[in-house]
Image (tube, helix red, strand yellow):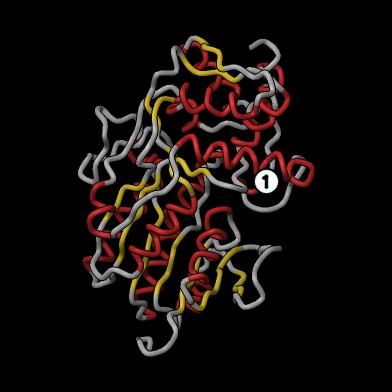
Amino acid sequence: MVDNNMKKKALITGGAGYFGSLLLRKLLEKDYECVIFDLNDAEDRPSEVGFIQGDIRDYAAVLAACKGVNVVHHNVAQVPLAKDKEAFHTVNYNGTENLLRAALEAGVDKVVHTSSSAIFGIPDQNPVTEDTPPRPGEAYGKAKYEGELLCKTYVDKGLDVSIIRPRTIMGHGRLGIFQILFEWIYEGNNVPVFGKGDNVYQFVHADDLAEACILAGERKGSETYNCGAEKFGTMREVLEALCRHANTGSKVTSVPMAPAVIGMKITSAIGLSPLGAYHSLMYGNSMYFDISKAKKELGWNPKFSNEEMFIESYEWYVKNRDAVINSTTGSHHRRGVKQGVLSLVKRIL
């Protein structure tokens, strides 16, 4: 067990990734000693932060990283953009079991597991609460849900684990599929919504999410928290607000939902589109969390609305566009995405 009189030490798995790197900086601001565990080092890692190179699927490496640690923030995940069902299982499930087993063996005080709203698939009703039964609709969501079940198993073994479920993460530096959206708007192209675009869709800013993770890491007791923006609206509303802000001539245009979803699924499956199964599943559907539990128990208060985080993220993209548009290194969410067939779609909208 770690000496509580010493500076708290945090291990961030996936600390070189998009969210992991932002969480790292928030932890440093709160005077944590930090170490990241990842396959690759981050170019922007602060000099005072330790780096352990390793694969989450390697138990010996994970165990070594967990020794002497107070809290582990577990963020390693194979994301939907990877479209790799085997990796979804080996990383998001087997890797999570390695982390939990190692944390228990090493005597870690607390584990915060970052899960996903994908575990719910298309919910029967909104808002989604912590008690809404999970019903993942694709391979990524299923693997993340299985990871949650592992957490509950290790809680029964005596490990203190809290689960954070974020809505779709947005924030400065967020690329991946959002780079495509931002580039289209930057160029003045129209952007699509399915049907009227009146599906209510909640996002969460990475800074707000990091704050929730840190608060959960400092609270004893194994709990689950749904995290999202407090101010949000429809998909059309947030995209129209961004188009107005950018003032490049882009407009939001409606496309029929059923054929669009079929087209997304087919082009994704045959490798013509960068989008994954989860994107076609959810883009035209409503989903938003009840965040009252996180606010009450953690004292968490998200600062960013949907519109604010989209505008901030777009402005970051415009400022850094030349450096990131052709980036090929880093995690899926920290590098540009090849548009594939989407480059043709934008010409007909």
Is there any visible trace of residue 142 in the rendered image?
no
In the image, taking residue 156 as reference, residue 33 lies left or right, namely: right
Q: Nearer the viewer, residue 96 or 109?
A: 109
Q: Height in image: 219 above or below 272? A: below
**In what element is the residue under mark 1?**
loop
What residue lies at 25% left-to-right and 27% top-to-bottom?
Answer: 124
Q: Amino acid at mark 1?
A: Arg
| Quadrant of the drawing holding the N terminus | bottom left
Give above or below for 163 relative to 110: above
Q: Which residue: 67% across, 26% down? A: 184
Q: Which residue is mark 1?
A: 335
Q: Measured from the top left, where is residue 32 in percent x and y?
A: 48, 76
Above or below: residue 248 compared with residue 47? above
**Front-lying residue, 286 or 299:** 299
Q: Residue 330's x, y, as percent?
A: 67, 53
Q: Is residue 265 above or below residue 64?
A: above
